[in-house]
């Protein structure tokens, strides 16, 4: 690993792990980080990486998709031999490979749609083969729907944690990021895609400014269908989800606590600064053009926010602001020291500004292995911090 250059507005890792392309490096670390919860093992992930050309999004898509096919076939073989658990374990790894494969595919292209459909199918089959208590649901929203999954803990009285991801997530991958660890630590877990997350942009849904509204719709379903109880509900937001839950924290009184890695009350600032930094870098003499992977990431972001260009991206996110003075619910803020100065400054300002009398700020350094964005290289630590916090909150509320 190498020390990263000076922090950029959207920096998410302090170290280079494998790829010079910063987006590729982040999502390779993400693929590694899912391993302990059932994603690709280290050897599998590095095998895939050896077949990727740094910065070439198409080679990334092909390499991860091929690994998905291999693991899907392995799962079928195990199932034919009557080894259902082995099949489920291989199938969950196939899901993780398919999920990673579409990260650098054009969201309007055939490869994206094919990999996304395969990831959905593999995830659902893995839940069944592993006999996990997963019930899939759809929340009607603006003529379309928001997909999700509910995992019922064996303790029917267990608190329910609603997990909301960020700009680059789908509800299924959040099972590996944190959902499985939450379930195994005594909580029921609900995970859902908000507008613009997962594949919802294909239905014409885009990132919401008033994120508390779709979160409320998901919460309504949890109460009505899964018997979640106000006061026994927690809300966790990751990355851009740190904005979404910051909004909900000031509007919805049903949550006993809200948690964020990181709190992100003004994403518009990050997007605007990132655009300015990108334009300045491109104007420097001898500047290298963006890689194909970078251009794909930009295309996908435009698709999710409903923008055609950088100016529209900034305009459509300008209203994304959460007011800390509205928030009095117990709040846990988690920050990795490798995150960008923008993430760090917003997280600290949020923690200082909320009116909560019960609040905690956790800063994780490089020695913890959890200093990356949303603890990308140590997902266990993310779950540990959240569950220890919730244990205290819910014990105090009894």
Image (cartoon, grey):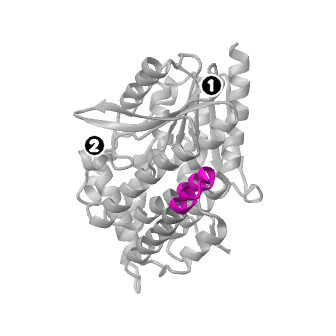
Label 1 Cα neighbours within 10 Å, binned few <14 / some 14-19 / many ≥20: many
The picture places residue 225, in percent across and down from the top left corner, at: 43, 21
Label 2 Cα neighbours within 10 Å, binned few <14 / some 14-19 / many ≥20: many
Q: Which residues are magenta?
A: 75-92
Q: Residue furthest top?
A: 398
Q: Nearer the viewer, residue 324 or 223?
A: 223
**Above or below 169: residue 48:** below
Q: Residue furthest right?
A: 367
Q: Residue at x 59, y 19 (%)?
A: 232
Q: Indicate which label's residue lies in the foreground, 1 or 2.
A: 2
Q: Secondary structure at mark 1?
A: loop
Q: Nearer the viewer, residue 256 or 250?
A: 256
Q: Nearer the viewer, residue 116 or 78?
A: 78
The picture places residue 152, in percent across and down from the top left corner, at: 57, 29
**Can you identify the residue that label 1 sits on?**
330
Secondary structure mostly seen in the magenta stretch? helix
Q: Quadrant of the N terminus?
A: bottom right
**Relative to residue 373, is residue 320 drawn left or right?**
left
**Above or below 181: residue 377:** below
Mark closer to the chain start, 1 or 2 = 2
Q: Nearer the viewer, residue 33 or 21?
A: 33
**Can you identify the residue that label 2 sits on?**
205
- Asked if residue 80 is among those painted magenta in the image, a careful observer would answer yes
The picture places residue 363, in percent across and down from the top left corner, at: 70, 47
Q: Quadrant of residue 148?
A: top left
CA separation in Å, label 1 and label 2 = 31 Å
């Amino acid at each position: 690993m190498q020390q990263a250059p000076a922090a950029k507005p959207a920096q998410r890792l302090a170290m280079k792990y494998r790829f010079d392309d910063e987006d590729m490096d982040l999502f390779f670390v993400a693929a590694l980080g899912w391993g302990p919860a059932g994603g690709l093992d280290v050897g599998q992930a590095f095998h895939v990486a050896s077949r990727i050309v740094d910065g070439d999004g198409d080679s990334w898509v092909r390499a991860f998709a091929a690994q998905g096919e291999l693991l899907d076939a392995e799962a079928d073989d195990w199932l034919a031999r009557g080894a259902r658990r082995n099949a489920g374990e291989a199938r969950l790894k196939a899901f993780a490979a398919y999920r990673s494969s579409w990260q650098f595919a054009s969201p309007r292209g055939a490869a994206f749609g094919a990999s996304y459909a395969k990831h959905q199918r593999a995830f659902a089959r893995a839940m069944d083969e592993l006999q996990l208590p997963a019930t899939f649901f759809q929340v009607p929203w603006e003529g379309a729907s928001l997909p999700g999954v509910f995992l019922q803990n064996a303790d029917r009285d267990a608190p329910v944690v609603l997990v909301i991801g960020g700009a680059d997530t789908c509800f299924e991958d959040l099972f590996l990021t944190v959902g499985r660890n939450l379930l195994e630590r005594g909580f029921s877990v609900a995970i859902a895609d908000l507008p613009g997350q997962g594949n919802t942009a294909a239905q014409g849904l885009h990132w919401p400014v008033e994120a508390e509204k779709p979160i409320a719709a998901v919460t309504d379903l949890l109460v009505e269908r899964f018997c979640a109880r106000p006061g026994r509900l927690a809300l966790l937001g990751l990355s851009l989800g740190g904005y979404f839950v910051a909004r909900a924290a000031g509007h919805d009184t049903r949550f006993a606590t809200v948690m964020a890695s990181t709190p992100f009350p003004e994403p518009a600032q990050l997007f605007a600064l990132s655009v300015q930094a990108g334009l300045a870098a491109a104007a420097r003499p001898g500047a290298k053009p963006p890689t194909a992977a970078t251009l794909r990431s930009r295309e996908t972001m435009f698709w999710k926010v409903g923008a055609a260009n950088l100016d529209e991206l900034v305009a459509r996110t300008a209203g994304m602001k959460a007011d800390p003075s509205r928030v009095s619910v117990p709040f846990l803020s988690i920050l990795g020291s490798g995150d960008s100065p923008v993430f760090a400054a917003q997280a600290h300002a949020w923690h200082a500004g909320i009116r909560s009398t019960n609040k905690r700020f956790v800063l994780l350094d490089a020695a913890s292995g959890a200093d990356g964005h949303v603890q990308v290289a140590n997902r266990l630590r993310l779950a540990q911090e959240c569950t220890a916090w919730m244990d205290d909150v819910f014990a105090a509320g009894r």
